[in-house]
Amino acid sequence: MQTAEYLATYLHPSWSWLAYVVVAAIQCGLLMTLLLVAAAAFTWAERKVSARIQDRLGPTRTGGRFGWLQSPADGLKLLCKEDLVPGDADRTLFLTAPYISFCAAFCTFLALPFANGWVAQPMNIAVFFILAVGGIEIFGVILGGYASASKWSLYGAMREAAQVVSYEIPLGMCCVIPVMIAGSMDLVVIGENQRGWFFNWYLFHDPFTFITFFVYLTCTVAGTNRAPFDLPEAESELVAGFLTEYSGFRWSIFFMAEYGSMFVLSGLGAVLFLGGWNGPIPIADLLQLTPETHAVAGFLGNAIGCANMILKCTLGVIFMMWLRWTLPRLRIDQVMTTCLKYCVPMASAMLLGAMVWTYAVPDPRHVPEEPGAENAVADEGELATAMIDNKGMIDNKGMIDNKGMIDNKGGR
Amino acid sequence: MEPIINWHSFFFLFFALVTCCFAVAVVVAGNVVRMACYLVVSLGAVSGLFFLAGADFVGAMQLMIYVGGTMVLLVFGVMLTAKGPFVSLETGAGNWILAVLIGGSLVAILVQTLVSVDDWFGPEGRRHEVAHTTDGNHAVDAMHGAPSEAIETKTGKSDTGAHTATPIGLGLLGVRVDKLSQENERLRGGMSGYLLPFEIVSVHLLVVLIGAAYLARARRRGSEISEKDLSAELRKEN
């Protein structure tokens, strides 16, 4: 919003509305580029990683030595394919379903911070927002599966619904634990609480968070339908599950959505457990690249943080690929067993354990919050300070902040 | 000078229009899945209104519960009960008349309420819009300890992002942040502290849900057809 208002000072007052459009367009453009580039890079990486795991070379000829141009070539091929719609299909729903998935995946990027304050929409409830909007992604899948009027697709969609709805429970519980420790649902605050060396990360906060991280990883893999949990598109049983009837570009949009949500969930995991933009060694702090030194230094520090964050996201996605090409697919009952008999009880136990730990072992790094409170519930007195603290943290940069777009104060 | 486009009003009108149009589409559509789809869009636009009003917690809650819930409804309601590939519903003339009567009277009551509150036509357009959005969602309000109050305190501060999650959580526990300056000791509590009843109701609903699933399952298991008969029947069908 500050950026937009700053921009608006250069414009004629009656044209100040344009500033918000420009700022929003820049932010959305940046995020969209990131999503698309990530999808292209991960498609290539998936081929390479799978090839190496299976003792092959993977693409080698398309565009030089490492097959760098494989993804653009793939994209071109998909664009040239015929856009098929089955005769019995519900045409409108069939055609819109991929876009619903993609939009949901893209919207989660809005709340994901890439460095201290580098977030498209600073939100007090970013964790919750990402989980809520990410949940809509499966709506596109279910709709696509149903509208295809094919039994394979319908089975795929049913499995998807059962699986994702089940895994949302332990996933949410795992997210609650870092939220509880940080006393905030704001991802920027959670990330900043882990500032410093790697032992400050919530992964090493206590034994319970350490285990929680692995439960979170399992749920992430299951939540994004990646093998060994890719039952919705199990090609050995269901041809291609919900994707059976999709061809060409629409199919690739589903894939972009999948890579997007993999990226976002890795990013969420990175911020919640792995310190987010704070590297294992606090290079930015050691070189005094903080906003307190100089604005430019702060920008450089944030750039390093952003690189850190993207590296962590990428490592997360590569880890998922590694799992996919190493482990055999589970049966549907095994998938449900993993969730209901292992992940949910483990997540619940870890939640209780972490609660007791935060209460018994006060953290010297930041003020301990009331245990057991998910929404940063504090005493009345503490609340005011907490609110001011949060505000200060968000206030001091506002580098990227398009809140003004939906705020009439700028206009009036 | 006023800017040509006020984005707040623009997005309010946009979301309100989407909500209303798709709500009508739910009624008019014949296909059950289409209906569910339109319902999702309508509910999603309502959450957009919440975000616009600065109540991002309620907005996300709306997405999580209503939009997510409709998806589950879609799966269980449609996919498990459908006999043909695309189910459609025909509404009889009698049902139409009844629905128009009931719906019309509800609209009349709501419009009358809308017109009768002077504050909503005041210079503060913001408050006017907040009232609009919460109007049809008393259920949500009640569930989250009347967040519209929290919104108003927040808009009064007019600074960075919305901080509605904490006031709502505190409201559930019995502390109304927006009423701390209230002189009267008894009014200061407001209508709050409903965490325990809320939890009891939710656990109760869960029990009902599991019970319903169990009953539906038990009937199938208790049926006379043994596995042998079933396979014989299947062979006959083929």
Image (tube, helix red, strand yellow):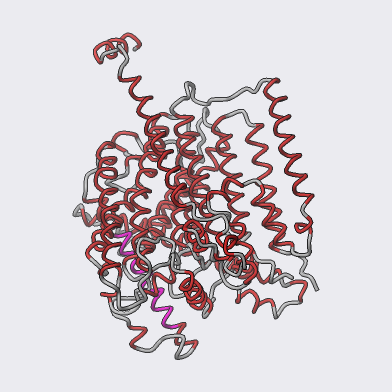
Which corner quadrant of the image does residue A15 belong to?
bottom right
Q: Which quarter of the image is occupied by the N terminus of chain B?
A: bottom right
Q: Position of residue A131 (x, y in %)?
A: 44, 54
Q: Can residue A32 be seen at all in this image of the molecule?
A: no
Q: Which quarter of the image is occupied by the C terminus of chain B?
A: top left
Left or right: A253, with B207 as reference point = right
Q: Can residue A122 be seen at all in this image of the molecule?
A: yes
Left or right: A171, with B226 as reference point = right
Q: Pick out the residue farthest to the left.
A: A55
Q: Position of residue A64 (x, y in %)?
A: 34, 64
Residue for point 49% across, 35% down? B74
Q: Give the answer, above or below, for where B98 lies relative to A55.
A: above
Q: Pick out the residue farthest to the top.
A: B236
Q: Pick out the residue farthest to the front.
A: B185
**Residue placed most toward the observer, A86 or B187:** B187
Residue for point 57% across, 72% down? B160
Q: Does B182 lie within the magenta span?
A: no
**Residue placed most toward the observer, A64 or A126:** A126
Residue for point 28% across, 57% down? A352
Q: Give the answer, above or below, for where B34 lies relative to A310.
A: above
**In this picture, which residue range is highlighted in magenta?**
A300-318
Q: Position of residue A408 (x, y in %)?
A: 69, 67
Q: What's the magenta bit mostly, secondary-structure-wise?
A: helix
Left or right: B165, with B27 as reference point = left
Tell me how many marks there are: 0
Q: Does A311 lie within the magenta span?
A: yes
Q: Position of residue A67 (x, y in %)?
A: 33, 60
Residue for point 30% across, 68% down? A202
